């Protein structure tokens, strides 16, 4: 992982006992009625926290939570999240009601070697989202070194993700290190042939993504609602399907760029259609040349799946973002589930490297029971998408100084 120092570099550089280590985590977990509904982000930062604490460091955790407007709001306090962290790190996690100033300083001073403390929401201060140098300096006063283990926040140039890295010796945590290694294997320096599977509802949200991928991959599979726009751009009738008719020229341009880059674009040749979008609606599979005017495309068909399967058999690397159909509503989940299970099987066999990310993608892979067998599944959302678009992520770039 060229350019980024890791925890291993930190362990070689200094003794950890008593060292105050600021760890930027992403504890912005979903909650309902005061309970965490998905603890994935807590699980992923736990190894960094425990490694540091086990070596005697004072571990000081920074995070945002929710969208407060630069001032304290009780509903966005990290206090309940701090308590929820304890089972994952196997020790007590204390809490300070501010992330800077005397309150934070006194709480950190009272922390024993090997102790863990979570500081209050960084977004309770306007300087956080402004990437304010003065606020970053105030945060940095709480520690001796800085560890960023929040790749999911790395696309934001905020004080606790970017500016602070210029104030202290800075390192990538274990989750950050794993994510960057996986992403490099997927698109940075991948083993070819590389296939990207991109789905979702709209082309408009993924124009930059598609534009970057056609330059990087050998085969680009386009599914979901966005495939309808490409079919329409080729003169196909798509009935009542979701379609961005104002983006047909954009779709044609992407197709032309793919041809210039020797990237094969795979669009559906047959599709599953229905008159209405509801669970277990009456559906049929038709050619893309025979979509009825009164029906909508909701999934890829069996011939399309067979072609994708053939491409996957020869692939060495797969990058996946977005479902192939309306996977939340059966029977329109079948294409996504079948393809996901094949990628999982080939990965388990050691035939390919598979990296996936994006909210809908993770949900779809979970439904297919395929998540555990993928090489890496990112929980980063927006940061993962921006990385796929080829955008430099401020929180990652700051670790390279």
Image (cartoon, rainbow, N blue to C red):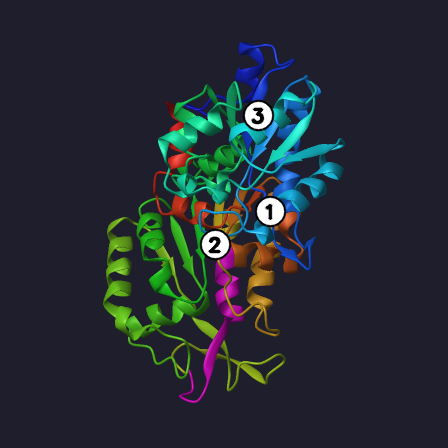
**The quarter of the displayed image where residue 87 is located:** top right
Q: Which dot marks residue 77?
A: 1
Mark 1 secondary-structure assignment = loop
Q: Is residue 294 magenta?
A: yes
Who's the residue at 42% across and 87% down the image? Answer: 292
Who's the residue at 41% across and 22% down the image? Answer: 167
Q: CA gap, disc 2 to disc 1?
A: 32 Å
399, above or below 220, in the image: above
- Stretch of the chain drawn in magenta: 291-310
Mark with earlier residue (3, 2): 3
Q: Which residue is mark 2?
A: 321
Q: Which residue is mark 3?
A: 105
Mark 2 secondary-structure assignment = strand
Comparing 367 with 44, the one in front is 44
Asked if the residues shown at circle 3 and circle 2 are in contact, with their CB atoms under 8 angstroms apart, the answer is no
Mark 3 secondary-structure assignment = helix
């Amino acid at each position: 992982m060229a350019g980024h120092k890791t925890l291993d570099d930190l362990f070689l550089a200094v003794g950890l006992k008593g060292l105050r280590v600021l760890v930027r985590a992403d504890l912005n977990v979903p909650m309902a009625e005061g309970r965490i509904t998905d603890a994935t982000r807590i699980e992923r930062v736990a190894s960094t926290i425990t490694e540091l604490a086990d070596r005697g460091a004072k571990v000081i955790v920074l995070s945002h939570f929710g969208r407060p407007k630069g001032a304290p709001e009780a509903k966005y306090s990290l206090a309940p999240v701090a308590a929820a962290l304890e089972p994952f790190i196997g020790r007590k996690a204390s809490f300070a009601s501010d992330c800077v100033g005397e309150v934070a300083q006194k709480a950190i001073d009272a922390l024993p070697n090997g102790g863990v403390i979570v500081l209050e929401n960084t977004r309770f201060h306007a300087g956080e989202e402004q990437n304010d140098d003065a606020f970053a300096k105030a945060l940095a006063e709480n520690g001796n070194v800085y560890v960023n283990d929040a790749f999911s926040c790395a696309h934001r140039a905020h004080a606790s993700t970017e500016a602070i890295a210029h104030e202290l010796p800075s390192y990538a945590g274990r989750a950050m290190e794993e994510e960057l290694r996986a992403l490099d294997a997927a698109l940075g320096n991948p083993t070819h042939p590389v296939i990207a599977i991109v789905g979702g509802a709209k082309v408009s949200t993924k124009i930059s993504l598609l534009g970057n991928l056609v330059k990087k991959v050998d085969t680009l599979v386009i599914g979901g609602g966005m495939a309808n726009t490409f079919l329409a751009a080729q003169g196909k009738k798509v009935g009542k399907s979701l379609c961005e008719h104002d983006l047909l020229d954009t779709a044609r341009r992407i197709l032309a760029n793919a041809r210039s880059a020797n990237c094969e674009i795979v669009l559906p040749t047959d599709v599953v259609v229905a008159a209405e979008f509801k669970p277990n609606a009456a559906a049929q599979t038709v050619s893309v040349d025979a979509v009825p005017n009164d029906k909508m495309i909701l999934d890829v068909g069996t011939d399309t799946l067979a072609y994708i399967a053939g491409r996957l058999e020869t692939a060495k690397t797969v990058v996946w973002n977005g479902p192939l159909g309306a996977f939340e509503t059966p029977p329109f989940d079948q294409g996504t589930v079948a393809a996901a299970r094949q990628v999982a099987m080939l990965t388990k066999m050691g035939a390919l490297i598979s990296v996936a990310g994006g909210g809908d993608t993770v949900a779809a892979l979970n439904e297919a029971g395929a998540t555990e067998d993928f090489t890496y599944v990112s929980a980063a959302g927006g940061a993962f998408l921006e990385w796929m678009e080829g955008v430099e992520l401020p929180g990652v770039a700051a670790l390279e100084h």
